[in-house]
Image (cartoon, grey):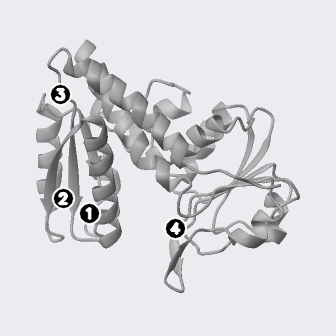
Amino acid sequence: MTVELSGKPVARKLLNQAKQTVDDLKKIDYLPTLAIVRVGTDKSSISYENAAIKAMKRVGIEVESVVFEETVTSKKVIDAIIGLNRDKKIHGILVMQPLPDSLSRNDIARCINPKKDIDGLSPENLGRVVENDRTTLVPSTPRAVMSLLKHYNIPLEGKDICVIGSSPVVGKPLTLMLLNAEATVSNLHVKTKDTKRYTKQADIVISATGVVELVTADHIKDGAVVIDIGFGYKDGKPVGDVKYEEVAAKASAITPVPGGVGAITTAVLAEQVAQAAWNQCVE
């Protein structure tokens, strides 16, 4: 029988941990605060921002929003982030994605103080992932995947894992985190010649492309674990990268969309704000 890997119990656990840290900080009059920076009015960005605010409020984290018009210059956004870096009342900075084409994600990521970089965008924090520094702030979606796998006691050591998607915020850092867990990892991308050649040999298949129903039953072997990070719409309904019904019939465990990895990411953000605040408090 296929196990559905719901993200909801994982999120509850992470939120409870974050709340405990926040409560401990408030006892010494230290108020964890997140600054959310958004450029433009992208619907998915606003939706995620609202979900993040809800998660923060749930654990007692204060939120300040910094919103710019889509026509804003890079200098103005970077100057605002530098100001947040210097503001001792701000403990975490979250820059909403996607950014307009006129802005460089890399330039903006480089200017975030790594100690406040709660979505793990800065080169310094990504470099610490390479070093397997478990105290660093990491990209929220990869950390959500790792938290889910740990919660359901899915072993990683020595396993063959296939990650589809190589973005710098999901696929690449997730591949590194899985390597740090001593898995053997194949990272596939748009130039990969034969996707099925890799996925059909994998014990765990993780897809993070945003291509609706890209992964079908003939992509996986019997008994594989399938983690779906994608999100899109088909016939007006939310779906992921995985053709759920037919893949679930073949997999040993699978995440739903919605309610899987996506349910965990904002809880990870809350936990990382709490962690960042604690680190800054004890410095």
Q: Position of residue 196 (x, y in %)?
A: 81, 66
35 lies left or right of 149: left
In terms of depth relative to the viewer, which is nearer, 277 or 105? 277
Q: Position of residue 5 (x, y in %)?
A: 65, 50
Q: Which residue is mark 2?
A: 74
Task: Check disc 4 and give the amino acid type.
Answer: Phe
Element marked by disc 1? loop
Total marks shown come to 4
Q: Which residue is mark 4?
A: 231
Tell me the crowding category of disc 1: few under 14, some 14 to 19, or many 20 or more residues within 10 angstroms, Cα based.
Answer: some
Q: Which residue is mark 3?
A: 31
76 lies left or right of 113: left
Whether the residues at callouts 2 and 1 have beta carbons within 8 Å, the answer is yes
> From the image, which quarter does the C terminus lie in?
top left
Q: Which residue is mark 1?
A: 103
Front tag of 4 and 3: 3
Picture layout, residue 155 above or below residue 72: above
